[in-house]
Amino acid sequence: MAARAFARRALATKRAFSAAPALPESCKWTPCPVPTKGAADAPVALIFGWTSSTQKQLSHYARVFHACGIDCVTWACPPRQVIDPSASTKVAAELLEALHEAPALAGRPVIFNGISAGAYSCGNLLWELEKLVPDAAERGDFYGRVACGVYDSPVDFEGVPKGVSSAVFGEGSALAGAAQRAIDGYLSLIDTTAWEESSARFHAMAPRAPSVWIYAKNDVISSVATNESIIASWRARGDDVATLVLDESPHVKHIKTAPDAYFRAVHGRVGANYLADADTVPLVTLDAKPAAADAARDDAKMHS
């Protein structure tokens, strides 16, 4: 109900949006639908979706950022952009161009929001930036624009064989083992440089922005061990990394399993409200059954 009420109020404001920027295929401009304090200083959330995600699905994530006055660009990644690295590289290059040239985006701070394989897309963007901007000082200008990162159920190249096989056939089963070996064999026969380089850029994460990681202990696709390893390495170099770890929640469903905790985790990391009127939107922008939300909140633990 809250999300529908939010949408009705948004339409009632009849806000005059800035001109939509030209974006690559599979990306969509999703501005905050209610008045904000001013777009110039407000960040833009880059929401990198999971493989086969849809714009409708990603709109739920955009609402979380809209609730504090942040415009969004959503990238709904079709399977062909994962299978064919050149396709995702093309999108990354065009998105970088828009971030530097489009009046609605140029110069504004950005938020990385990588969901599942969308974490790989963050790395893909950074790798493409290295190729397009060889000068490290010039790249530093873009790194400085990254205000924070939100990584939900992250998956990178190394986790694909086990994650996919476990999700389909059940972790530890004979079929899962066979499927994992088959995927490993396939990957050994093709050029995986683009995937490996993009994953490496995500692991290294040159922008040293504060971040929050959201994942579940029972998620066999988003490796808890890998997540904890990356988090530990970022913290060891002095990065501010918070986590929201759920005991049980399906892959990329945490926003529905624990909407209140999810909202607080993201907004706690964003750290500012850019709405012209803070009372314009509700604190929770997602529909959820109260009992389920309360149970999930009891299971969720915030760590920082």
Image (cartoon, helix red, strand yellow):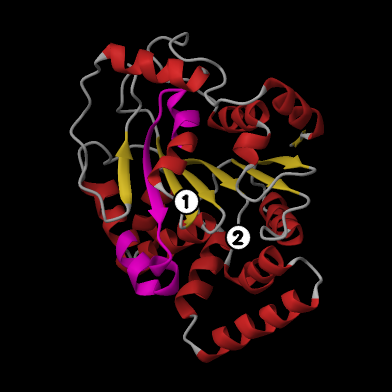
Between residue 8 and residue 110, name the one nearer to us: 8
Side of 45 where 206 appears, left or right: right
**Which numbered disc flags the more N-terminal residue, 1 or 2?**
1
User: Three-letter amino acid code at disc 2?
Assistant: Val
How far across and how far down the image is residue 195, in percent? 49, 73
Q: Give the secondary structure at mark 1.
A: strand
Residue at 33% x, 69% y: name it. 87
Q: Residue at x 44, y 20 (%)?
A: 4
Left or right, residue 214 beside residue 44? right
207 part of magenta stretch: no
Q: Tell me the number on the disc at residue 49.
A: 1
Q: Which residues are magenta?
A: 62-91
Crowding near the residue tagged with mark 1, few <14, some 14–19, many ≥20 C-alpha atoms within 10 Å: many
State whether residue 34 appears in this view.
Answer: yes
Q: Secondary structure at mark 2?
A: loop
Indicate whether residue 82 is drawn in magenta: yes
Question: As drawn, is 252 to the left or to the right of 29?
Answer: right
Q: Residue type at mark 1?
A: Gly
Image height check: is 89 above or below 302? below
* Residue sitting nearer the eye, 280 or 295: 295
Image quarter of the C terminus: top right
Residue at label 2? 155
Where is 244 relative to 7, above or below? below
